[in-house]
Image: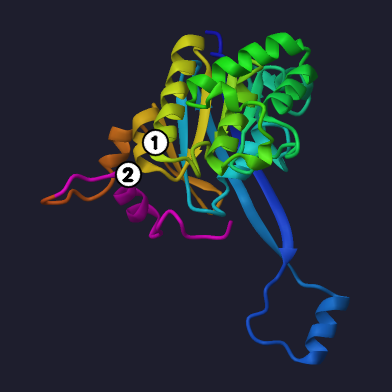
Amino acid sequence: METPIYGLTVRDVTKHFKRSKKPEHKLRFFEKIKRILKPEKEIIRAVDGISLDVNIGEIYGILGANGSGKSTLIRLISTLLLPDSGTIHVFGDDVVSNSMKVRRVMNRVSVEASFFKRLSSAENLIYAARLYGISSSEAHKKAESILERLGFEAKRMDEEMEALSRGMQQKVAIARALLTTPMLLLLDEPTTGLDPKSKRDVQAFIEEIRNDRNAVIVLTTHDMVEAERLCDRVAIIDNGKFIADGTVKELLAMAPPKEKTTTTLEDVFIYLTGKELEEGDA
């Protein structure tokens, strides 16, 4: 029997970092000098043995507090970081040995998207498209269509990026990722900073992309309602490890039932981790 080819396969992936160890008490002068000359390091297990499979046409959500490892995992999948161990395959291709091939079929939206702030959104998008061999005229037409679908008025495409709100800049970031028609779309908190209407516009567009293209979508989010609406399956990550994975219905069954209110994903998250979603270091 042939092994099925998933859109995304992650097997026992780890990524650890070293950082200066925080002192447990106020340091005396000679202790500060000692730390400067010989700094103490600690290991941060950002991603610690994670495995997952995402089917073609599936939206896979990852819930976790700040500092839990979800953004590091996205960077590993997107080839921005190399794993310390384990393997990641996109449509059967290894992201390390076939990184250039993998990059041609994926794109990423980050909550910390960067732009040329003195250029307009149109100029930023055309520049990005040209890197992928898309002509300027085609890029402008496609960018206008995507932005209008996201609720971004075409007449504002010539305004400098620094004049746009945080939410509008995020819409441009989403449009930039979609210009290349990626078959794997990595969305790292894509609706953070958006007003409620814009958030709904983006969520509807994400659903449309999955349905129209049968794309593979990985979504990290703090928004429980967003996860319930969009995701076919959801994983909860804590301290670099997946502590739960399943459909929303399966996850809701993990928390003790409440008498007068309906159990939510937030209830499940707090029950399994003992944390609020906003806890942790960024």
Kind of element beneath mark 1:
helix
> Which residues make up the magenta segment?
261-282
When asked about the image quadrant of residue 162, the answer is top right
Amino acid type, label 2: Leu
Q: Which mark is residue 227?
A: 1
Give the crowd class for mark 2: few <14, some 14-19, many >=20 residues within 10 Å. Answer: many
Q: Quadrant of the C terminus?
A: bottom right
Q: Position of residue 179 (x, y in %)?
A: 64, 18
When asked about the image quadrant of residue 188, the answer is top right
Q: Position of residue 112 (x, y in %)?
A: 63, 44
Kind of element beneath mark 2:
helix
Q: Is residue 55 visible?
A: yes
Residue 37's place in the image compared with 248, above or below, is below
Amino acid type, label 1: Ala
Q: N-terminal of the two: label 2 or label 1?
A: 1
Q: Which mark is residue 265?
A: 2
Q: Position of residue 61 (x, y in %)?
A: 46, 34
**Number of numbered discs present?**
2
The reply to whether callout 2 and callout 1 are in contact (CB within 8 Å) is: yes
